[in-house]
Image (tube, rainbow, N blue to C red):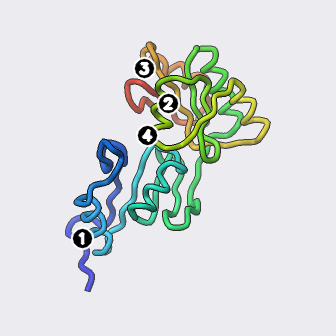
Amino acid sequence: EKRKPEYYNVAVSDFDGTLAKTDKTVSEKTLSQIHSFISHGGKFAVCTGRMTASILPVCKKYYLGDYVISFQGAAINEVKSGKSVYFNPINPETVAKLCDFAKSANLNFQVYPDNGFMALLKTSETEFYSRITGVKYEVRQDVGEYFLRENKFTGKALFYVGDNDPQELLKRIKSVLSAGEATAFISNPRQID
């Protein structure tokens, strides 16, 4: 007979720096605890800022629950099938607006179409992101135009802060967005999602 978890029916965890060790693997002890929780009727999910294409294979490999939440909550996918059950994307017009802002402010900017990502510039940050997530990227100056032309949507857009004051930059980014168009926040002192 399955025993219900003592305290929680649902558990959600970040991946990088939480479940994952520095080598991006999950320890046997952690996996054992997650699998025990699930086998006793608990529901477990990973919630991450990573793109779906990066985190879904990891969740499948380790069987980290039935669902994965990616793009800071903009997408939810079934782990087993990869099927999308929820997606609240940024539309092509907003991507183009944000890209124009990034160019005018001399900022690096990333967006995530399909199974990779695009950046305005090749930097140590884009190289690092590609390396830790295991996805390839393309540098192109026409990101906004590309999204408009191809009618592409994305779960997330990211600005690297550089030497700018993150709070001031966040205000400037929000000033280009219409109410409800997208949510912008400081995810760490070096980037705004």
Lower sequence index among marks 2 and 1: 1
Residue at the far right: name it: 149
Q: Is residue 100 left or right of residue 10?
A: right
The quarter of the image holding the N terminus is: bottom left
Which residue in the protein does label 1 denote?
5
Which residue in the protein does label 4 denote?
132
Closest to the observer, 145 or 57: 57
Mark in front: 4 vs 1: 4
Lower sequence index among marks 3 and 1: 1
Alpha-carbon distance for marks 2 and 1? 41 Å
Residue 47 in the image: x percent, y percent?
41, 51
Lower sequence index among marks 4 and 2: 2
Tell how many labels: 4
Alpha-carbon distance for marks 4 and 2? 9 Å
Alpha-carbon distance for marks 3 and 1? 41 Å
Residue type (three-letter) at the residue carrying disc 3: Gln
Badge 3, how many Cα within 10 Å: few under 14, some, many 20+? Answer: some
Q: Is residue 60 left or right of residue 88?
A: left
Alpha-carbon distance for marks 4 and 3? 27 Å
Residue type (three-letter) at the residue carrying disc 2: Glu
Is the Cβ of the residue at disc 2 closer than 8 Å to that at disc 1?
no
Which residue in the protein does label 2 denote?
127
Q: Is residue 151 left or right of residue 91?
A: right
Which residue in the protein does label 3 denote?
167
Residue at the far left: name it: 6
Alpha-carbon distance for marks 2 and 3? 25 Å
Question: Could you tell me which secondary element the residue under label 2 belongs to?
Answer: helix
Question: Could you tell me which secondary element the residue under label 3 belongs to?
Answer: helix
Q: Which residue occupies 59% across, 23% down?
A: 121
Lower sequence index among marks 2 and 3: 2
Alpha-carbon distance for marks 4 and 1? 33 Å
Residue 76 in the image: x percent, y percent?
51, 56
